[in-house]
Image (tube, helix red, strand yellow):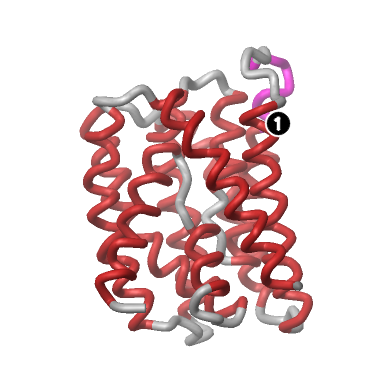
Amino acid sequence: MTYVSLILIGFVIGLFVLSTGGGGAALYIGVLTTFFHLSAPVAAATSLFTAFPSLCVGAYGHYRTGNIRFKIGNKMLLSAIPATIVGALVSRYIPMKIYTWIVAIILTVLGIQILYSRFFSNKKADAKTVHANLKTALFGILAGLMVGIAGLSGGGPVIAGLLVMNLDMIRAAATSSYILVGTTGVGLLFHLSTGNIDWKIGVCLMIGAIVGGLVAPKMLAKIDPVKFDNYVKPFIGVLLVVMGLHMVI
């Protein structure tokens, strides 16, 4: 696959995930393992390297629009960052076969979660519950473990936790980008020490992702994110399931 193709893939993923509050690492891992046949640890480290700069760019764009809710974001970071550190410290002791299965299962579950939330979940569920803060902390812990162990950005649990805190989709996406900068940055620092990054592939994907990160906040101001999710999320859900199954079949 040419470098131009890699840049285009990075752009598309960066544009989509930063428009919907994700970090894109799951998609990057799927692409890296499915099309480039990288091992799970190398794909995990490369995905974080690719996603982090675009997250920074996207978060700054959301900051300029005033959509980030720092108070809620900081609450989730307090639980997510320690979990990221624990996950990263444990990941290096996990055997390759088990590591691959962990990543494959997470990719598959995320895909199913996206499809379920699109077609079956109750979107009008009351988020103002006594346990909202506890749920947010648990979502933060799950996101941190996903980043630390599997090299994923943890965008799914983060968005879920923010919606529990009664944020609308636009502000949830913006606040998620801020949270993911913290978790992905910490995860990247630990994975850098393993020397597992495929620099050529990672840099090309990163360039495209940064451009996508620049465009995403502006695009959110011009389109209906609900309609955008309705059309694109089912495709992403199926894609993640296929990529996860491909790793172990």
Magenta highlight on residue 45: no
Rendered location of residue 29, percent (x, y) = 53, 66
> In the depicted view, which residue is nearer to us: 212 or 183?
212
Residue 224 visible from this viewpoint: yes
Rendered location of residue 193, percent (x, y) = 49, 82
Residue at 55% from the left image edge and 81% from the top image edge: 37
Residue at 63% from the left image edge and 33% from the top image edge: 136
Work out whether 185 lies above or below 199. Answer: above
Residue at 65% from the left image edge and 66% from the top image edge: 149
Q: Is residue 89 left or right of residue 209?
A: right
Secondary structure of the residue carrying tag 1 is helix
> In the depicted view, which residue is nearer to us: 44 or 187?
44
Q: Quadrant of residue 2?
A: bottom left
Work out whether 230 lies above or below 103. Answer: above
**Image quarter of the C terminus:** bottom right
Q: Residue at the bottom extreme?
A: 195
Work out whether 235 lies above or below 125. Answer: below
Could you tell me the amino acid type at mark 1?
A: Leu
Rendered location of residue 194, percent (x, y) = 53, 84
Residue at 72% from the left image edge and 81% from the top image edge: 93
Q: Is residue 102 left or right of residue 174?
A: right
Residue 90 visible from this viewpoint: no
Which residue position holds label 1?
Answer: 134
Magenta region: which residues? 127-135
Within 10 Å of disc 1 (Cα), the crowding (few <14, some 14-19, many 20+) is few
Total marks in image? 1
Q: Is residue 232 left or right of residue 223?
A: right
Q: Quadrant of residue 218?
A: top left
**Image quarter of the N terminus:** bottom left
